[in-house]
Amino acid sequence: MNQEAEREPADGAPRGLTVPARWALVAAVLLLATVVALWPRDQGSGGDEAAEPGLDAARVAADLQACPTGSGTEIAQLRGARAECLGNGETTDLGSALAGKTTVVNVWATWCQPCREELPVLQRYAEESGAAQVVGLQVESDRQGGLELVEELGVRFPSFHDTDGSVKRALRVPTGLPASYLLTPDGEVHFVREPRVFTEVEQVREAVRRYADEPATAPQRQEGR
């Protein structure tokens, strides 16, 4: 008997395969591994949707008001800062979308406990006759969770999702949340230093009156409120 013919292949390949066949099998396995590794990257924005399977239903349930489109003087500080409208998923440049109106921009996140207390206050203010436009900016938390939170709180004013952090950087948002800003029709941006958390509607009214008449200032970097 030919002992070489009976010996098991050293590389562990199935007996009876020729060398070319074994190489073809190895190549097929490597190709499959490559396809699996690259698959999520090839999905683009669809991959994000797959990561939040309840996103569409959450949008319907939250029933947020339409995000503003803006008109008038572009807000230079926000030029090029893009965000996704939380209510419909459309991405826009906030330098243009928030232009032309007195606007309260409130920065919030799902993990921020004071935000949960402040958002309903801003909703009550937004419902008043003659109120400034109120817009939320969700940061550092996923969209579906954000939509579920505003639905729970009964908040319907429009919010944007700062997907890539560009708006947060443009506004120079401090570490502690929430944070609010007053945008004027001529494009100025005012950081609302006091109060840091709105607990009463009158505080929002007063902040709008006060900051609409002051020179624009940027917040200082800080580690907390």
Image: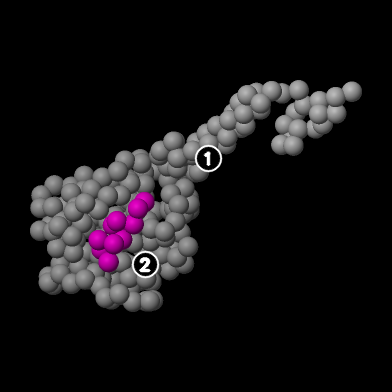
Q: Which mark is residue 178?
A: 2
Q: Is residue 60 magenta?
A: no
State the image quarter where residue 15 is shown: top right
Q: Is residue 110 left or right of residue 8?
A: left
Left or right: 219 with respect to 4?
Answer: left
Label 1: how many Cα within 10 Å (few below 14, some 14–19, many 20+): few
Question: Disc 2 residue type?
Answer: Pro
Which numbered disc, 1 or 2, marks the residue that appears first in the sequence? 1
Say which quarter of the image contains residue 32.
top right
Secondary structure that dominates the magenta span: helix
Q: Which residue is depicted at the point 33% across and 73% down?
A: 196
* Of 145 and 157, the residue lying toward us: 145
In the image, 72 versus 43, the foreground residue is 43
* Position of 122 relative to 37 (above/below): below
Residue 135 vertical placement versus 63 (above, below): below
Amino acid residing under circle 1? Ala
Scheme by which the image is coloured: one colour
Give the image location of residue 18, x and y in percent: 69, 23
According to the picture, the residue beneath numbered tag 1 turns out to be: 37
Residue sitting at x 36%, y 63%: 121
Q: State the image quarter where residue 205 is shown.
A: bottom left
Where does the image place residue 150, in percent across and percent down from the top left?
A: 43, 53
Judge whether residue 167 is colored magenta: yes
Q: Which residues are magenta?
A: 163-172
The residue under the point 20% across, 68% down is 190
**Quadrant location of the N terminus?**
top right
